[in-house]
C-alpha cells in the first residue's frame, strides 16, 4: 500500500503539530489528468467518509476514496527540498510514463 518516506513523515508531523491538526489525516485525492495519467493532490482532512480507505505509514493516517486505491498500491510519498523548490511528491511506479494516445499537451 502507500508508504511515506522518513522525510515526508517528519514534515507532515511538523505541519500537523504547527497547525494543531492532530485529529487530521493526510487525504490523497484526484486533482486532474495529465500526460502521464491521473494527477493526485494531498491535503490534511478531518472528514473520513464511510467509503474511504484508511492506511497508516510512520504513524500518519492516510485516507483516500476507495475508487483510487488500486492505482496507488505501490506509491511512495516523499518530501523534497531542492534549489527549485520544496514540497511533497508522489512517486507512483504504476502511473503511465509516456503520453497516452491523443495527448496534445506535450507535443
Image (spheres, rainbow, N blue to C red):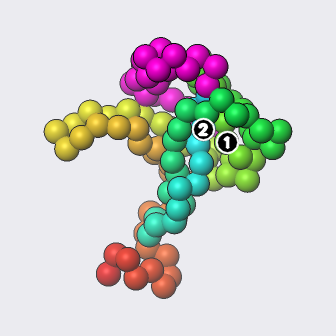
Rendering quarter of residue 106: bottom left
Which residue is denoted by mark 1 in the rendering?
64
> Was residue 20 drawn as part of the magenta stretch in this picture?
yes
Q: Magenta residues?
A: 1-24
Instruction: Tell me what residue is drawn at x 46 percent, y 44 percent.
Output: 90
The mark tally for this picture is 2
- Is mark 2 in CB contact (under 8 Å) with mark 1? yes
In this picture, residue 97 sits left or right of residue 69: left
- Percent x, y for residue 94? 55, 54
Q: Quadrant of the N terminus?
A: top right
Rendering quarter of residue 64: top right
Instruction: Tell me what residue is drawn at x 51 percent, y 47 percent.
Output: 41
Label 1, residues with CA under 10 Å away: few <14, some 14-19, many ≥20: many
In this picture, residue 69 sits left or right of residue 41: right
Of label 2 and label 1, which has the lower sequence position? 2
Which residue is denoted by mark 2 in the rendering?
27
- Residue 23 got which mark? none
Q: Secondary structure at mark 2?
A: strand
Amino acid at each position: 500500500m502507500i508508504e511515506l518516506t522518513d522525510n515526508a513523515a517528519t514534515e507532515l508531523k511538523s505541519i500537523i503539530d504547527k497547525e494543531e491538526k492532530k485529529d487530521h489525516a493526510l487525504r490523497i485525492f484526484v486533482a486532474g489528468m495529465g500526460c502521464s495519467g491521473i494527477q493526485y493532490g494531498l491535503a490534511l482532512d478531518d472528514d473520513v467518509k464511510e467509503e474511504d480507505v484508511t492506511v497508516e505509514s510512520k504513524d500518519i493516517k492516510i485516507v483516500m476514496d476507495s475508487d483510487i486505491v488500486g492505482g496507488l498500491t505501490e506509491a511512495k510519498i516523499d518530501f523534497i527540498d531542492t534549489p527549485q523548490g520544496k514540497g511533497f511528491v508522489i512517486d507512483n511506479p504504476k502511473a503511465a510514463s509516456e503520453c497516452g494516445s491523443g495527448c496534445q499537451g506535450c507535443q
